[in-house]
């Protein structure tokens, strides 16, 4: 009985996953010199024909998966200013600590062979001495390396 139930659940999951067309973006997220290996939920915010829209993707090391129809919206010639947003949890002295990131994302990176997003939290002395933020509202430095274009980390 348990085996049959498991087969039914797996079959429903397979059918459900087949009904969605998923695309993959080759992205690596590095926070404080560590490749993020935990799954993350990624929120894409963008403007399309004067409307502010949101779509969601999932990050696993090396990839962001996103629904094909959502990716088409992001790639549209009418799409303006794309941002990605995600949260990350780490521990300081055995207590959970949450970081929230909001990053300008170039449309070019949606089709690039790879994009490496490097983040350095400036609440850590090691990084606050070396880097600076591009915005007063952010407490982290950002550097992005793509196959076609890059944004350097701002040094002090």
Image (spheres, rainbow, N blue to C red):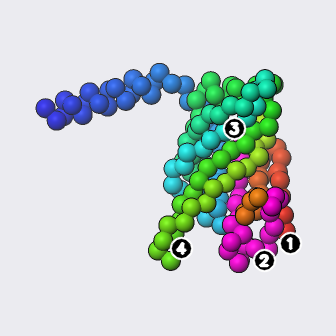
Residue receiving disc 2:
129
Badge 1 or badge 4: first in the primary sequence: 4
For disc 1, the marked residue is 156
In the rendered view, does 76 fall on the left or right side of 27? right
SS under mark 4: strand
Q: Position of residue 156 (x, y in %)?
A: 86, 72
Q: Position of residue 63 (x, y in %)?
A: 60, 44
Q: Marks 1 and 3: in contact by CB < 8 Å? A: no
Place of residue 81 in the rendered image (x, y in percent of width and height, measured from the top left): 79, 37
Crowd around label 1: few <14 · some 14–19 · many ≥20 (10 Å): few
x 50%, y 67%: residue: 96
User: Residue 45: which disc?
Assistant: 3
Residue for badge 4? 92
Residue 45, visible in the rendered structure: yes
**Residue projecting furthest to the left:** 1
Mark 2 and mark 3 in contact? Answer it, CB < 8 Å. Answer: no
């Amino acid at each position: 009985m348990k085996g049959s139930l498991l087969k039914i659940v797996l079959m429903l999951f397979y059918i459900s996953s087949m009904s969605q067309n998923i695309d993959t973006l080759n992205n690596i997220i590095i926070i404080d010199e560590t490749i993020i290996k935990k799954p993350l939920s990624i929120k894409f915010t963008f403007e399309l024909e004067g409307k502010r829209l949101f779509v969601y993707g999932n990050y696993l090391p090396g990839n962001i998966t996103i629904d094909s129809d959502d990716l088409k919206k992001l790639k549209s010639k009418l799409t303006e200013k794309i941002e990605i947003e995600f949260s990350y949890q780490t521990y300081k002295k055995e207590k959970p600590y949450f970081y929230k990131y909001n990053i300008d994302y170039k449309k070019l990176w949606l089709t690039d062979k790879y994009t490496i997003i490097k983040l350095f939290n400036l609440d850590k002395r090691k990084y606050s001495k070396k880097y600076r933020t591009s915005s007063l509202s952010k407490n982290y430095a950002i550097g992005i390396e793509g196959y076609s274009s890059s944004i350097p980390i701002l040094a002090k």
